[in-house]
Structures are given as structure tokens and as C-alpha cells.
Image: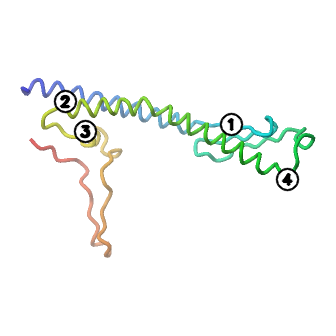
Amino acid sequence: MDNDSLRHDLAEVMALAQDQMRALAAAQQQRMALSGKGTAADGLVEVTVDAQCMVTSTVIGESYLQEFELADLGGHITTAAQAAAQQVERRGTALFAPLAQRRQEFSAMSGSLVDAPEIDELLSMINPTSAAAPAAQHDGEGDEGWTEAPRFPTVKR
């Protein structure tokens, strides 16, 4: 592969990586805005959870005690909360599914480049703070044992 072809392919991979980073940021933002609702006891118990699956609302229908026992209320609330959390999980998974597919395509494309940096190296070049680079390492001793991981990868030629 000549240098012009390699440059072109690398530019294409970098553009795809930038698109992926933008799409990831958008999906993360959408994920944080998710909520889910679950119901139990024929819809008389409704629980809403936020993106972190924390309960934000619990509504008990006025006729609950006419149809169900008070002793069963806790179980119905739990069932509704679990259904709401599963809904949030499904929606979150669906949000990130296209990104996972694009990542596979990206990996295949970057893998076809001879002597090209790996995907994590490319992503760290685009946005060093979001790269999956290892954090500082510690040898178990005092502060003098800490070493900083490099911010930018070394690109071999």
C-alpha cells in the first residue's frame, strides 16, 4: 500500500472515529434522559424510574385496597419498579446498539491498515481525555510509587 492510499485510509478511519465520538456523546446524553414506567396490580400500582433506575414516582390507584390486600402492596411496588428498570435497560441497550455495530466496522477498517495505530490510540488522538488509556499505576507503596500513564500514544513507523 503506498503512502497516499495509507493517508487516505487513515483519514477515512479518523473521520469515522470522530463521527463515532459525536454519536457516543449524543447517545450518552439521551441515555441520561431516559425514564421508565412499570405497573403492577392491574395497573393500580405505577412506578417511574430515572436513567439510574432510581424511583422518581410511585402512584397507587385509589381503588387498590378494594381489589388487593395492603399486605401485597410492597410486592406490587417492587414488581412495578423492576419492570420500570428493565424498560430503562432495554431502551439504553437500544440506544447503544448502532454504536456497537459501527465500532465493529471501525475496528475492521482500522485493522486493514498496515502499521496503523489501534482504535484506542486513534480515539485518544481525537480526544485524549475520553480515551480508554489506563489511569495512574500504583506499586502499593507511598506516593513516590505513582506513575502517570502517557497522555498520547506512541505511533510506530
Farthest residue to the right: give it.
Answer: 66
Tag 3 residue: 122
Quick one: 112 or 12, which is closer to the camera? 112
Determine the CA span between mark 1 and mark 3: 40 Å
Q: Is residue 62 above or below residue 105?
A: below
Task: Tell me the residue that label 1 is attached to.
Answer: 37
Say what amino acid the circle numbered 1 marks.
Lys
Residue 146 appears in which quarter of the rendering? bottom left
Residue 20: image location, x then y, percent: 36, 31
Q: Residue 148 appears at what percent x and percent y?
A: 27, 60
Q: Earlier in the sequence, mark 1 or mark 3?
A: 1
The CA distance from mark 3 to mark 2 is 10 Å
Label 3 crowd (10 A; few <14 / some 14-19 / many >=20): many
Q: Amino acid at mark 2?
A: Leu
Residue at horizontal 77 percent and vertical 45 percent from the top: 76
User: Front-most of 120 and 11?
Assistant: 120
* C-alpha gap between disc 4 and disc 2: 64 Å
Which residue is found at the position 42% from the left and 29% from the top? 98
Q: Residue at the spot x=24%, y=42% of the render?
A: 121
